[in-house]
Image (spheres, rainbow, N blue to C red):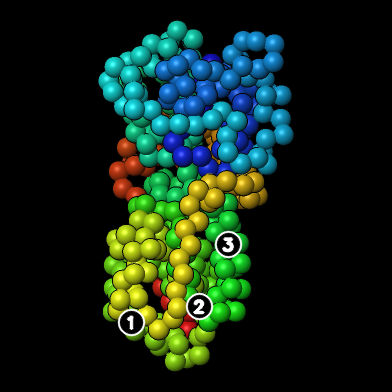
Amino acid sequence: MRIGVFCSGGDAPGMNACVRSVVRTALSAEQEVVGIRRGYQGLLDEDFHRPTGGGILMTARCVSNIVQRGGTILGSSRSPEFRTGAGQQKAAAILKKHGIDALVPIGGDGTFAGAIALRRFWAGRVIGCPGTIDNDLCGTDYTIGFSTAVATAVDAVDKLRDTAASHDMMFLVEVMGRHNGSIAIYTALAAGAECACVPETPTDIPSLIERLQELKLRGKRSIVMIVAEGDEMGGAAVLNEKLRTAGCPFETRTVTLGHVQRGGSPTPADRILATRLGEFAVMSLLAGKTGGMAGDVAGKLEITPFEATIGTHHHPPEDLMRLVDVMSI
């Protein structure tokens, strides 16, 4: 079997570890691997990873010394052309041309929606791996990159806390998460933030002001509020202005962490998850499975149909959201 592997959409720490796992698992099983650069667009452009010496088949040495690297050696992109029926038919023809029998796409909901569309024109097998920092895919407890993104955000908040305490100030720290508050909740809990505003719960300005006044009366001199970018108020900057207008009892500043959360060396947890899922994806393909995502649910590796992984968003546990409030007194 010839297996194609690629990364698509936003990069996530641990993607390289997953690529490495796919390549070495396939080679160990005496299968062939083709690395496709720049996701679906690279497929359309026939842009393949080419090892030293020519050809398009990857070797074990192609993925040496990458498990600790952030980003992805295969590159990633978003492809407007692939979203069209003509683009999907072209991609199917290219896969047939190069004798690619199966695919392991590494990415998020857009990547898997693309896999669903591709299968209308191509009969090969597809098993995906969840590479996204948002942790928003159903069918896995954690996605590749989430642990590192939280660690990056917590490190930043720890540093901001020093300034907040020195100046009796409140920081509103915006983290990624357009549809999901997992990064915000986990960061708030791990960094000891007093508040977290996420898409899953309504952000009530009067209640927030009352809470902040209560914390100040209890002797709190500085506050850190974590805000998911997808919060319905519109992010940290907008929320900051609303709080100021409503009489926030603290001097405030906003910090947007942005794309820094996608970079950096992946945590051990992300490296291990990526390695386990990459191996499981390949072995599932060899067992005849297709049309789903490899995930870790309660420590057990499972394949979930693509349609189920992107039909709804995976949300942070309610008990963790409650715990943030309990710990802030």
Three-letter code, disc 2: Met
Residue marked by disc 1: 247
- Work out how far the residue at label 2 is from the one at label 1, CA to CA, in angstroms: 14 Å
Give the residue type at disc 3: Ala
Q: Which residue is drawn at 55% across and 75% down?
A: 164
Q: Earlier in the sequence, mark 1 or mark 3?
A: 3
* Residue 315 in view here: no
Horizontal side of 41 relative to 57 (left or right) equals left
Query: As rendered, which of 126 and 222 lies closer to the eye?
Result: 222
At horizontal 60% and vertical 30% (from top left) the residue drawn is 73
Do the numbered discs 2 and 1 sit on residues whose CB atoms are within 8 Å? no
Q: Report the mark closest to the observer, 3 or 2.
A: 2
- Image location (x, y in percent) of residue 91: 39, 17
The residue at which mark 2 appears reads as: 169
What secondary structure is marked by label 1?
loop
Residue 288: percent from the left, percent from the top?
46, 24
Q: In this view, does 218 lie above or below 79?
A: below
| Quadrant hosting residue 120 | top left
Q: How far apart are marks 1 and 3 (CA)?
A: 27 Å
| Residue nearer the viewer, 147 or 31 | 147
At horizontal 48% and vertical 62% (from top left) the residue drawn is 255
In contact (CB < 8 Å): disc 3 and disc 2: no
- Which mark is in front, 1 or 3? 1
Give the residue type at disc 1. Answer: Gly
Label 2 crowding class (10 Å Cα cut-off): few <14, some 14-19, many 20+? some
Residue 296, given in percent of the width and then of the height, sits at: 50, 46
The tag earlier along the polypeptide, 2 or 1, is 2
Residue located beneath label 3 in the image: 156
Q: Earlier in the sequence, mark 3 or mark 2?
A: 3
- Position of residue 296 relative to residue 42, above or below, is below
